[in-house]
Each structure stands twice: as C-alpha cells, then as structure tokens.
Image (cartoon, rainbow, N blue to C red):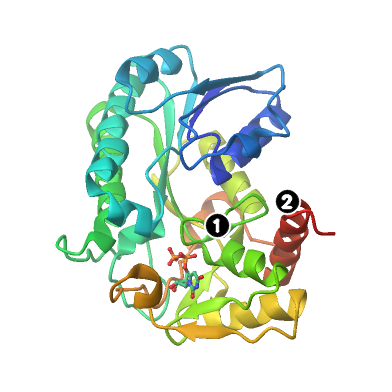
Amino acid sequence: MSRCLITGGAGFIGSSIAEYLLEEGHDVTILDNLSTGRDLNLQGIRDHERLTIRVGSITDSVLLTEVMAGQDEIYHMAAAVGVKLVADDPVRTIETNIYPTELLLRQAMHGGQKVFLASTSEVYGKNTKDSWVEEDDLQFGPTSKPRWAYGCSKAIDEFLALAYHQKYGLPVVIGRFFNVVGPRQVGNYGMVVPRFVESALQGIAPTVYDDGEQVRCFGHVSEVVRCVVGLMRKENLEHNLFNIGSDQPISIRELAERVVALVDPSLEIKYVPYKDYYGHDFEDVRRRVPNTNRLKETLGFKPVMTLDEILKDTIAAKKLALGLS
Ligand code: UDP
C-alpha cells in the first residue's frame, strides 16, 4: 500500500481521487486551502482512519515540503482554476500555478516520488481544428488576453514536469482534463453542467452564451479518476502526457435542451451574448474535443457512462444538496 499526497484534495476531482485511493487501501494526505475546494467535498471520508487533512496553501513552501516528506505518490491537483477566476487575478495565478509546482517537482525529485500533474484542455488554446485535438496540437492564445492565462500557466507546469523528467528521470504523468463533471461540482466558476442543472432545478431557465453551437465532451468524474490512478499504477509508460475525458461531442445548445428535458420541460432556454456574463467580449473555445486514443491504448479505457446517465447522476445529487427530492 502507498502513501499518497493529494494537493487540492478538497476540490471536486481531488476529493474523488482521495475516496478512490482510500477505498483501494492506501494512506491519503490532503493539502488544501479550502479556497475553491470545499470541506463539504470531504463529508464522506473526513473521519477515515487512513486520511490526514492539512488545511493550508501550496504557496506555503515550508508546509508543502513538510507534507511531501515520506509520501510515495503525489497527485498535484491544486491550482487556481476557472478561466474567469484566473483572468480576474493573474498574479495569484502565477503564485499558485507556477512557483509551487516547481518546488513540488524539485522535492519529488529528491524524495524519489512519482507525480501526477493535473493539466487542462485549456492548454490547447486557440486551436480550431474541427476534428480532435491530439497531445501535440497546442496553439497558444495571445498573452495580452487574460483569458489565456490559465492555459498558459498550466502549459508552463507541463514544461516544468517534463523538464524534471528528462533531466532527472522524475516519474511524471500529466493528465489534461476535458470537461469533467459529476455530483459535487459547483457552478460558481463557469462550469456549464452544474450551472444548467442548479438553475433548472430552481425553476430558472439555463442561460446559454452566444449561439450555443460551441461544442464540448463531458466525462464523469468517476471514470476520470479511474484513468488518473490507472496511469499512476502503470509501469514503463511510453508517454507522459494524456488527454483524459470523454470524446463524445455535444453542443451547449443541445446540452441545455437535455437538462431542461430531464428537469423541467416547461423552461425556455435563454441565449445571451458573452459580454452579459464576462463583462466584455469573450474568446470562447468553439470546439473542444479530445483525441483519447493514447489513453485508450495505454489503459484499454473506454468511457461507459452516457451523457444522460451523467446528467441524471448530477441532477439527483444537486436535488439532495438543494433539499429538493
Ligand atoms: N456556458 C454557457 N452558459 C453557462 C456556462 C457556460 O453557455 O452558464 C458555455 C461556455 O461559454 C462554454 C461552454 O458552455 O462555451 C462550456 O463552459 P465551461 O466553463 O463549463 O467549460 P470550458 O469553456 O472551460 O470548456
């Protein structure tokens, strides 16, 4: 059994990794400052005898060094997340997404620890390829547009991780998450599925930005977690970098229609310009569809949950959280 540290372990994906690793019998330590992560996400595991929770920031280098000592595996999930949040505070983004990752990698190199680095489909930037994006299809957006700060900061993290791997043989796995959804996700930071579900459950029509023809693929967090841990367990990986998520595209218009059909068909979907939400014109990613062949070939992974199953699971959980049943 391993000792595993999850930075950002109180987040939506981090807490799901914690549950999975505890279930497998490992010792788990969570480091989280509970900014975007929530204590509520740890409700089911808070009192687990093999879980240690440390409340603090990854920007506290003394604390980070202390919690990393003695661990076998590091799941680096902590980051400033959400395009809007990151664009609104670019300095915090650098402080959270870049410096601590460098320290963490350096420490892991000294400690002989294996690292999973959570990255994002945002690194594909302005890629407009109308088929699937493969791992090397990066096309950065301009640095003058804060919208791209998140993707650029995570791309730097990827460079750092691969640099430590190349120079020092540090074992690293980088996972680029594509629109991960599930019960505990909240809609405060953009995240379209919880926003649509929460608003429909409260009798308010979902708000679609622009024409709704932008395309995404939604993967269930439980399947994503299986991929993350599966990649960490795999010996002699041929690659260090993987797209992780579903590859089944759906337009945001159709997503809104499905949510409304499942929750309250009487609701009339609203279409608004981007600037009503972002306060200015927004460079959205019109199409975000991963090529997941590398993941499939490496793990034999194939997502099994359909979008309707994912939505029903999310709706049921939100009803409970909102006290509706
Ligand atoms: N979106 C929307 N209404 C909302 C929230 C998001 O129409 O209330 C759109 C957003 O403009 C984007 C898509 O849904 O085109 C996915 O947004 P999200 O923030 O969930 O993911 P990302 O854009 O980071 O892939």
Q: Quadrant of the C terminus?
A: bottom right
285 lies left or right of 182: left
Tell me, yes or no, if residue 306 can be seen here: no
Q: Is residue 223 visible?
A: yes
Question: Which three-letter amino acid code belongs to the residue tagged 2?
Answer: Ala
In the rendered view, tell whether residue 78 sits above or below residue 241.
above
* Percent x, y of residue 251: 53, 81
| Residue farthest along the right direction in this orientation | 325
Give the residue drawn at x 28%, y 44%: 93
Location of the N terminus by quadrant is top right
Q: Which residue is mark 2?
A: 321
Q: Which mark is residue 147?
A: none
Who comes first in sequence, dot 2 or dot 1? 1
Q: Is mark 1 within 8 Å of ligand 1?
A: no
Query: Which circle, 2 or 1, is nearer the viewer?
Result: 2
* Up/down of 308 relative to 152, above or below: below
Residue on which disc 1 sits? 180
Q: Residue at x 70, y 68 (%)?
A: 202
What is the count of numbered marks? 2
- How packed mark 2 is, by other alpha carbons closer than 10 Å (few <14, some 14-19, many 20 or more), is few
Is disc 2 placed on a helix, strand or loop? Answer: helix
| Spot occupied by residue 223 in the image (x, y as percentages of width and height) | 64, 52
Specify the quadrant of the image occupied by residue 247: bottom right
Q: Is residue 172 above or below residue 1?
A: below
Secondary element at tag 1: strand
Q: Residue at x 62, y 78 (%)?
A: 205
Q: Are marks 2 and 1 in contact (CB under 8 Å)?
A: no
Tell which of 259 and 320 is nearer to you.
320
Q: Amino acid at mark 1?
A: Val
Location of residue 290 in the rendering, given as x and y in whole percent from the top left corner: 45, 66
Q: Position of residue 212 (x, y in %)?
A: 48, 83
